[in-house]
Amino acid sequence: MEWYLKVVRDNYANFKGRARRKEYWMFILFNFIASCIAAIIDKILGTALTAGSMYGWVYLLYCLAVFIPSLAVFVRRLHDVGKSGFWIFIALIPIVGAIWLLVLLCTAGDSGSNKYGPSPKA
């Protein structure tokens, strides 16, 4: 939970620096759990956007609230492997782009400093 709060509270819109694999994937895990909870709350409250939809206003507001932090931690994760944030656009290449991006996100970061800053493990 501390990794999620670190991204949301401390590095809300920080696109500079580097993010460890643990920081990124823990944020993704807790973000998924919070998204599921928001969808369940929408289902319970009956605030679905369309008839039969599981997603509603609570889920939509949550997604809007974490969009910038999600993008920021994603870019910082790419910085950790020595890639620019513009590498996010490789996902536009069907299938291969998403697979390559997943490989980059799972790859260990550069040991020592790189052009985006010192190693977050140090």
Image (tube, rainbow, N blue to C red):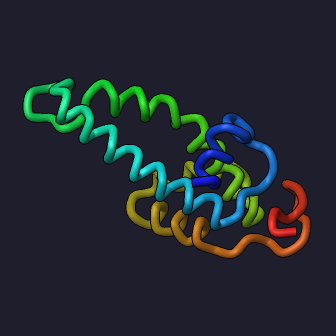
Viewer-nearest residue: 70 or 99: 70
- Residue 48's spot in the image, x, y percent? 19, 27
Q: Where 25 falls versus 5 (above or below)? A: below
Residue 98 left/right relative to 20: left
Q: Where 1 falls versus 66 (above or below)? A: below
Viewer-nearest residue: 8 or 20: 8
- Residue 62's spot in the image, x, y percent? 43, 32
- Residue 85's spot in the image, x, y percent? 68, 49
On-image quarter of the C terminus: bottom right
Residue 26 left/right relative to 15: left
Viewer-nearest residue: 83 or 109: 109
| Count of numbered circles on the image | 0
Q: Which residue is rendered at x = 67% and y = 49% of the image?
A: 75
Residue furthest to the left: 52
Viewer-nearest residue: 82 or 59: 59
- Residue 96's spot in the image, x, y percent? 45, 66
Q: Is residue 122 among the parts visible in the rendering? A: yes
Q: Which residue is rendered at x = 85% and y = 65% of the image?
A: 119
On-image quarter of the N terminus: bottom right
Q: Is residue 86 among the parts visible in the rendering? A: no
Q: Which residue is rendered at x = 50% and y = 55% of the image?
A: 28
Q: Which residue is rendered at x = 64% and y = 74% of the image?
A: 107
